[in-house]
Amino acid sequence: MAQVKVGLQGVAVAESQICSIDGEQGRLRYRGYDIHDLAAHSTFEEVVYLLWEGRLPKRHEMDVLREDLSQNRAVAAPILDVIRRHPPAQHPMEMLRTLVSALSLYDAESEDMSTEANRRKAMRLTAQMPTLVAAMGRMSRGKDPVAPASRLSHAANFLYMLSGEEPRPEDARCFDVALILHADHSFNASTFAARVTASTLSDMHSAITSAVATLKGPLHGGANERVMRMLLEVGSVERAESYVRGTLDRKEKVMGFGHRVYHTEDPRATVLRKMSEEVGRRAGQPHWFEISRAIESLMRRETKLNANVDFYSASTYYALGIPVELYTPVFAVSRIAGWTAHVLEQYAANKLIRPLAEYTGPLEQSYISVEKR
Ligand code: COA
């Protein structure tokens, strides 16, 4: 009898050279580089190169990738028509899943499984994801999409396509760091889903569609949106205590706390805490950070639980002017880097992922005709 590990908890299902997590020490590294170092010194584009290629780019390699990403941001007009012509999505992730899948119909290499074509598709999907999310955000408010600006960085261009105005350089840099922090997290559920799909030698767009569909679930993406709705409901530092106590007394979870892997502070939360304070102050909205701080210290005192990546990303995104319902799609704008890196790694040494189930139903049943049942 095979041993069952429910939820694959604690099971290593493959070797990978992309991302390592030390849950005891609170360390996260991409290709051996500490997330704090990358957040302080790198850019999202550089991290994309690192995740795909396994090393930091030389200057000209960086220039080529930047150019490729900025020249491939536009999506075919019929893709935007999908948003226009269909009933409004009940949640933007419903639309994003559909759009990512539709992209393959307009990708001339969708069925080309050569390594070179798969790398180009990874690049195009990474370039196009912000365009989809910004267009969804604008069109759901009755506004026209804004065409991408190739002169802007990946992060600045997303904020520009969303608001129609070029962001302050400091805000663009904060969003850039947020993208770096969310770019990969080893075999999380959506990445694993992408790798399962890739392991059947299905195409890149199919694998990424699986990932987006998996990110949609409230146990995975989505917690940052709920954190912001909580902050809006709490509304003031004075109300934080009664909110937290009430939630815990009802045995409900306070969103943005706890983690399956980290038993100490999530290193991404450390960086985001500072950013939330900085962006909030600049936007003239310091109270979201102050309410967050109050909730965090109450949670530490009452439960010993630490804030996770979603807790301070909520107030950071809010102060950057990102609509709350777009927080999970924004996760995909960043995680596409990790998803595609993992799909490329899966293709490079593929083995079909096909686990067993321990059958616990009845055995040896005799067929009974429908008249006699
Ligand atoms: N608020 C209050 N209590 C929490 C909590 C939270 N955010 N997270 C965990 N706990 C409590 C649980 O109620 C449980 O208590 P019990 O042992 O008395 O039943 C204990 O801590 C263990 O939690 P559990 O949900 O079993 O751990 P897990 O490893 O399966 O789940 C999470 C990890 C992240 C899913 C969980 O902490 C959670 O739901 N957090 C809120 C959602 C969130 O922020 N998700 C984003 C993750 S990056």
Image (cartoon, grey):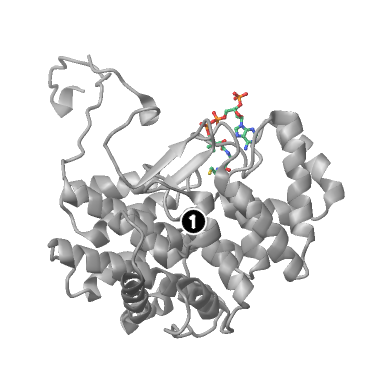
Residue at 44%, 71% in the rendered image: 130
Q: How many marks?
A: 1
Asked if residue 152 is positioned above or below residue 257 in the image, the reply reads below
Q: Can residue 327 be seen from the camera position used here?
A: no
Asked if residue 259 is positioned above or below residue 10 in the image, the reply reads below
Q: Is residue 46 rendered to the left or right of residue 218? A: left
Measuring from the top left, give residue 225's x and y in whole percent: 59, 55
Residue at 73%, 50% in the rendered image: 292
Measuring from the top left, give residue 179's x and y in whole percent: 49, 61
Q: Is residue 49 rendered to the left or right of residue 302? A: left
Q: Quadrant of residue 98?
A: bottom left
Residue in the foreground of this view, choosing between 31 and 310: 31
Asked if residue 166 is positioned above or below residue 98 in the image, the reply reads below
Q: Is residue 267 rendered to the left or right of residue 354? A: right
**Disc 1 packing (10 Å; few <14; some 14–19; many ≥20):** some
Residue at 31%, 46% in the rendered image: 193
Extreme right residue here?
A: 238
Which amino acid, by three-letter code, is at mark 1?
A: Leu
Residue in the foreground of this view, choosing between 270 and 79: 270
Measuring from the top left, give residue 47's x and y in whole percent: 41, 60
Identify the residue position indicated by label 1 in the image.
38
Measuring from the top left, give residue 254's x and y in whole percent: 66, 40
Q: Quadrant of residue 62?
A: bottom left
Image quadrant holding the N terminus, namely top left
Q: Is residue 5 rendered to the left or right of residue 178? A: left
Image quadrant holding the C terminus, namely top left
Q: Can residue 156 be seen from the camera position used here?
A: yes
Residue in the foreground of this view, choosing between 272 and 236: 272
Ligand 1: quadrant of the figure: top right
> What is the secondary structure assignment of the residue under circle 1?
helix
Asked if residue 260 is positioned above or below residue 190 in the image, the reply reads above
